[in-house]
Amino acid sequence: MSRKLTSVERVNIVLNGGIPDRVPVDLHNFLMTAEASGLPFPEYFQSGEAMAEGQIKAWKEFGHDVLLLENGTVALAEACGCKVEYTEGSAPVHISPVINSLDDVDKLVMPDPYKAHPLVENLKSTQIVAKEIGDQAFIMGRADQGPFSLASMLVGLETFLLALAFPENKDKLLKLFDFCLDVVYSYAIAQKEQGAHMTSIGESLSGPDVCSPKVYKEYEWGYAKQLVDRLKASNMPLAYHICGNATRIVSDMAETGAAVLELDYKCDLPSIKQATLGKSTILGVLDPSGVLALGSPELVTQKVREELEILAPGGGLILGPGCALPPKTPVENIHAMIETAHKYGRYTPEGELVRVG
């Protein structure tokens, strides 16, 4: 009998284009771990020790392959000087920018990820989790937002989106993106240094639900490609997340060379499978709210099986939520997701799913 794969081995086989024993499973559960901790959310999300303890506890209960470590979507913005509010019952939120004009880009200060709050706490969380279970579970230490989304926070969303509409602003925007690229890269490398196997960025603002594919290709794509290439040179794979219906740009996303595309349930599954096969691994794409948080275990099982049938053949899939799970997601639904994936996500050596009677 062959030796059972560890989660790290299983995920690496998928990332390298191979066929593992079964489809790996991811949990985007940082809000769930905060809820389960019993601590006030503001305290939890500013404590590396608490976040690590929450993630390890969840892993011991659910046995998922991929742990996604973060404290929300505004860590880099706060580190760069934006005003952020830590709220009860949810992730931290962006309140105000650090500059009010593209003419002030030179006033921005590069944060040191080992000194700036809350990056130092997030890195502490990664270090603890990697040290304790990094040989058993695949650790994805998020590098927070990508250059496009971070830029919008630093200068303010309204100012940013308005600037995109006028070609004369392009040089100033690119200068801001250059700064943001360096910020994201520095944090991503720090995640690697703390033991993360992979890093991740979110760029949902650049997706078709907000910006046109033309804007995506003109401003976002090149910076995603640069980040992928710089991280590859440091042997750090990148997962690239865009919420909403990103079907129209998935081919372009794959062309960045990102190892993983974190995609949402709104995407057309056959289309994204075709666009990524042999190029990138899909992570997702279950509906975190309508199915996993609000559905029944039976609905979860149904949706997992439907996704596996379309996205699993030939490899290239890590199954999980398409975005963050709500804090009060029922644990029985998480168990249903993972148990169904383990039962129906097993592979033949040829990359087809094992048929279960």
Image (cartoon, rainbow, N blue to C red):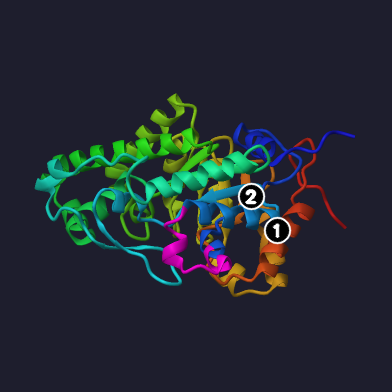
Residue 28 badge: none
**Residue 4 colored magenta?**
no
Mark 2 or 1: the one toward you: 1
Image height check: is 130 above or below 165? above
Left or right, 254 with reference to 269: left
Corner quadrant of residue 298:
bottom right
Residue 252 lies, in percent from the top left, at 42, 41
Residue 78 lies, in percent from the top left, at 30, 53
**Residue 41 colored magenta?**
yes
Q: Earlier in the sequence, mark 2 or mark 1?
A: 1
Residue 311 badge: 2
Instruction: Kindly identify which residue carries mark 1.
Output: 61
- Please give the name of the residue rendered at 48% of the width and 41% of the height, measured from the top-left corner: 199
Residue 116 seen: yes
- Quadrant in which the N terminus appears: top right
Residue 309 seen: no
Left or right, 182 with reference to 142: left
Over which residues does the magenta segment extend?
A: 34-47
- Whether pointer 2 and pointer 1 mark residues with C-beta atoms closer than 8 Å, the reply is no
- Please give the name of the residue rendered at 81% of the width and 47% of the height, measured from the top-left corner: 354
